[in-house]
Amino acid sequence: MSHTRKSSGFLIKQRLFIKGYLITYIETSRPYGIQMLDELKQHFKPLGYTPNHAEIYRALHELLDEGIVRSGQKKLTEDSYQEITIYYIRDAEKAHALKQHIADEVRRSHKVLLRAIEDFDLH
């Protein structure tokens, strides 16, 4: 599985970062894609980060392919024919392992950025 590899990158990859939030949202509710995108945008807007639609869905598709989440259809309203895709955790153990890996990558990236602040004397 790709998330078990040791990072050799500069900072955490955006899609991996997004996957951590998607798993957390899916664990705590039964969200659909646009709902998660809106939550992420609102959460990070004050910090100047706006994840895009394509990255959210790429991350969701990777989580599906990795067997971490599954999807199901649900009617938007009781009297509607319009359906939305709802996401569920399929493998809690894999989800937990991936979130742990993401947390490690966030910590590593944080240290890189703190070093840069010190080196550039940007206190």
Image (spheres, helix red, strand yellow):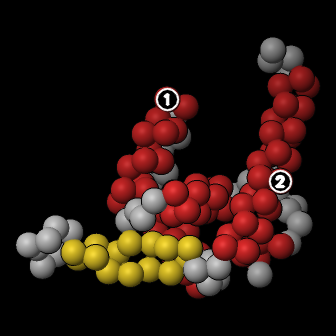
Position of the C terminus, as image quadrant, is top right
Residue 86 appears in the picture as rendered: yes
Tell me if 61 is positioned left or right of 81 in this view. right
Residue at x 85% of width, y 62% of height: 7
Residue under the point 80% across and 17% down: 122
- Earlier sequence position, callout 1 versus callout 2: 1
Dot 2: few (<14), some (14–19), or many (≥20) neighbours within 10 Å?
A: some
Task: Tell which tag, 1 or 2, sits nearer the viewer.
Answer: 2
Q: Residue type at mark 2: give it.
A: Asp
Q: Considering the numbered disc 1 on the image, is that residue within a helix, a strand or a loop?
A: helix
Residue 32 image position (x, y, % from top left): 38, 65
In the image: residue 118, left or right of residue 21: right
Q: Position of residue 70 (x, y in %)?
A: 50, 81
Q: Nearer the viewer, residue 43 or 54?
A: 43
List x then y, in percent, for residue 36.
Answer: 43, 56
Which mark is on residue 104?
Answer: 2
Identify the secondary structure beneath mark 2: helix
Q: Give the residue pinned by disc 1.
A: 46
- For residue 69, what is the image quadrant? bottom right
Taking the spot 32% from the left edge, 80% from the top edge, the residue there is 73
